Image (spheres, rainbow, N blue to C red):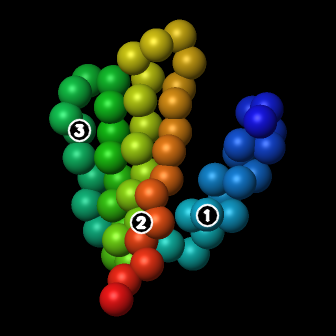
Amino acid sequence: MDLEEETVELTKLLSGKTVIHVWRFRAAEVLIEFTDGTRLFVDARSDAIECSVTDGISD
């Protein structure tokens, strides 16, 4: 997936969500948790930024 495709996908996954917490465990890492439990992890320790999203479906 190229950067533009990744940007579109992240926008779709996170659209309309509300942030509940932001954590900084290390200088190059950010974890953003949304009210529905979705989490966005951002890691900039390498020469590129890595992003991952976990599903926040609540029971």
Residue at image position (57%, 64%) is: 14
Crowding at mark 3 (Cα within 10 Å: few <14, some 14-19, many 20+): few
Crowding at mark 1 (Cα within 10 Å: few <14, some 14-19, many 20+): some
What secondary structure is found at the residue carrying circle 1?
A: helix
Query: Mark 3 sits on what residue?
Result: 24
Q: Position of residue 3 (x, y in %)?
A: 75, 33
Q: CB atoms at circles 2 and 1 under 8 Å apart?
A: yes
Residue 33 sits above or below residue 58 on the image: above
Quadrant position of the N terminus in the picture: top right
Query: Mark 1 sits on what residue?
Result: 13
Q: Point out the residue furthest to the front here.
A: 59
Q: CA distance from mark 2 to mark 1?
A: 9 Å
Q: Position of residue 8 (x, y in %)?
A: 75, 52
The mark found on residue 38 in the picture is: 2
Q: Point out the residue furthest to the left here.
A: 25
Residue type at mark 1: give it.
Answer: Leu
Q: CA distance from mark 3 to mark 2?
A: 17 Å
Residue type at mark 2: give it.
Answer: Thr
Q: CB atoms at circles 3 and 2 under 8 Å apart?
A: no
Residue type at mark 3: give it.
Answer: Arg
Which is nearer the N-term, disc 3 or disc 1? 1
Looking at the image, can residue 25 be seen? yes
State which mark lies toward you, 3 or 1: 1
